Image: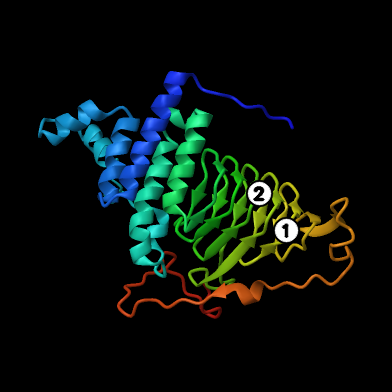
Amino acid sequence: MTKRHVSLPVDAEEGLKAFISGVDNRLSSDEDTCAVVEDVLVDLHGDREAYERWQAGEDVSAAQRVRLQGYDPCNATLESEYYAEKDEDAFKRSKHLQWLWRQFDATPMADNVDFALRFRQMLANHLFDECGDGCRFFKGITFTYGHNISVGDNVVIHDDAHLDDRGRLTIGDRVSISDGVHIYSHDHDIVDQTAVDNYHTTIEDDVRITFDAMVRAGCKVGENSIVGARSVVQSDVPAHHVVVGQPAQSVRIKPGWEDVAEPLDGDHPDGRADRQIEYDLPDDLDQFDEFQRDLDPTSGR
C-alpha cells in the first residue's frame, strides 16, 4: 500500500470529535435544520462577534449584513432550487445541508484533511438517501440535491467531482471517483433544451472512474471496471472491462477476470432507456423559458 496512518495531536483530536459530534447530534434532533446550519457557519467562519452585534440591532455595513445573512440557507438560492420537477419536501432540508457542505468547503478548515473527511462523512449521513461507512469525500464535490444519492461503504470521491442526482444516482461499495469526474442523471432534449429526462445512473461495486471522465445519465458502469481519464461514457460499461475514449469503448479486460467477463468483442447490451424516471409537474406551475426562443425551424430564428 502507498498510504500510511496519520494522527492528529491529542488536543486537536479531542476538539475535532467534540465539534463533529455536537453538530451530528443537533442535526439528528428536532432542532430546526436551518438554524443549526446558520449557527455552525457563523462559528466556522469566525464571525460570532459581528453576528451577535448584528442580532442585537447594532449598525453593520451593507457588506457585513449581506455576509451575515448569507450564513442562513434560507437567504440563499441554489441552481437546483429552480428545477420544477424536484421533490419540494425532500429538497427543503437537503438544501440547508447542501449549503452547510458548500460553505464549509469555503473555510480554511476544509483543507485539514482528517477533520474535513470526517465532517463530510457526518454530513453525508444526513444529506444522502444512504451513505455507508468509511467514505472519504474530498474538497469541492457538488451535487444537485443530495437526497437522491446512495453511496456504499469505503467509497472515495476526490476533489471537484460533480454528482448529479436530478434523477437518481447509486454508487456501490469500494468505488473510487477521481478529481474532476462528472456523473449525470439527467439529459436535455436535443431540440428543446428546456425539456429534461431524468434517469437512474448506477456505479457498481469496485469501479474506478479516473480523472476528468464523464458518465452520461442512465448508464450503468459495471462492477470492477475502469473508466479511463477524460473518457465519456455514453452507454453501459461491462463488468471487469477497461473503457477509454470519447465515446468510451472497451479496450481490454482487467487481468485475471477474463473467464468471468463478457468477451471484449461481444455484444454489450445497453439498458439506459429502461432507467428513465418519469415525473409529473404540478398543475399550477408557473413555468418560464430562460432562453425565450422560437423553436419553429421555419421562423428564421
Disc 2: CA contacts within 10 A as few (<14), some (14-19) or many (>=20): many
Number of disc labels: 2
Which numbered tag is attached to residue 134?
A: none
Disc on res. 223: 1
Q: Is residue 159 left or right of residue 80?
A: right
Kindly state the secondary structure of the residue where label 2 is placed: loop
Q: In the rendering, at what x and y percent does residue 198 appear?
A: 53, 69
- Return the x and y of residue 222 as percentages of the image width and height: 72, 61
Q: Give the image location of residue 109, x and y in percent.
A: 44, 29
Looking at the rendered structure, the kind of residue marked 2 is Arg
Please identify the quarter of the rendering in which residue 243 is found: bottom right
Which is more toward the observer, 222 or 68? 222
- The answer, for residue 164, to whether it is visible in the render is no
> Can I make out residue 185 in this image?
yes
Q: Residue at x 51, y 22 (%)?
A: 8
**Residue nearest the viewer, comparing 84 with 146:** 146
Residue found at x 88% / y 50%: 255
Q: Are marks 1 and 2 in contact (CB under 8 Å)?
A: no
Quadrant for the N terminus, please. top right
Residue sitting at 53 percent across and 58 percent down?
Answer: 150
**Label 1 crowd (10 A; few <14 / some 14-19 / many >=20):** many
What is the spatial separation of the Cα atoms under label 1 and label 2, in whole angstroms?
10 Å
105 in relation to 99, above or below? above
In this rendering, position of residue 32 left or right of residue 168: left
Residue 174 — which label? 2
Vertical relation: 92 (above or below) 119? below
Residue 281, given in percent of the width and then of the height, sits at 39, 76
Which element carries disc 1, helix, strand or loop?
loop
| Way the structure is coloured | rainbow
Using residue 11 as the reference point, say whether residue 241 is left or right of it.
Answer: right
What amino acid does circle 1 point to? Glu
Circle nearer the N terminus (1, 2): 2
